[in-house]
Amino acid sequence: KNEVEQSPQNLTAQEGEFITINCSYSVGISALHWLQQHPGGGIVSLFMLSSGKKKHGRLIATINIQEKHSSLHITASHPRDSAVYICAVRFGNQFYFGTGTSLTVIP
Amino acid sequence: DAGVTQSPTHLIKTRGQQVTLRCSPKSGHDTVSWYQQALGQGPQFIFQYYEEEERQRGNFPDRFSGHQFPNYSSELNVNALLLGDSALYLCASSLPGIHDNEQFFGPGTRLTVL
């Protein structure tokens, strides 16, 4: 049983498209993280949120605590957005990660 | 600020051997977590160190052990390596506390067990 589920697993988009990646979790959490992982392994933290919505540039993250669901949106997608996007939740001192959504943006 | 650093970047070992991976946290951080990421999978939590002690542990066997030094750097040791231990090992550091804190990840060490 995976505490964190992401969808879709793979996503291909044309440059400029609006992209949505979804994350559902089953445990009570204090915060949810969206991470970006590029080929080669490096992970960058994009957002940490516990309620509502956050925006950074073309990236928007929302969370609904009651429904245990979060979404990551990318507006005006660009080939440099191609990466794996991972949702992670913290329950106590432990992090649970989704398996990631592999995004490819085609020029 | 160098951020989180890990060494080595790549490592090849054979079954049964032992390996030590190293991590230096971001400046000002004193909590270090280790993760194993198999190919195509999300990271799996191994354990977390704070104040030189293991504070929390994931579902990994005792072959996986760690250590944190007074300067907050940390080591991950894996004994009796199995083929299935081949993975990217990620270290992340954060500030301590009961409130959630952002984790900063290192570039990882890619371990291949032959």
Image (spheres, coloured by chain):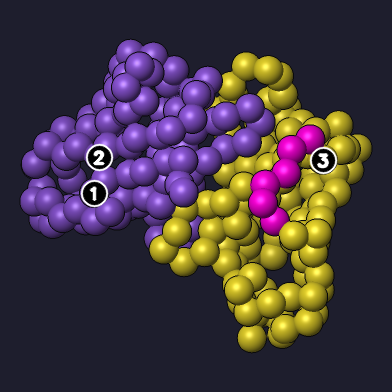
Chain colours: A purple, B yellow
Q: Which mark is residue A21?
A: 2
- Residue highlighted by disc 3: B54
How far apart in space, not on screen, are marks 3 and 1 (Cα)?
A: 35 Å
The chain that hosts pointer 2 is A
**Which span of residues is magenta-colored?**
B55-60
Pointer 1 and pointer 2: residues touching (CB < 8 Å)?
yes
| Chain name for mark 1 | A
Q: Which of A46 and B80 is in front in this view?
A: B80
Q: Residue B60 in the image: state x and y as whole percent.
A: 70, 56
Circle 1: element type = loop
Q: What residue is shown with label 1? A: A8
> What is the quadrant of the C terminus of chain A in the image?
bottom left
Q: What residue type is labelled 1?
A: Pro
Q: In which quarter of the image is residue B80?
A: bottom right
| Alpha-carbon span between mark 1 and mark 2 | 7 Å
Q: Is mark 2 on a helix, strand or loop?
A: strand
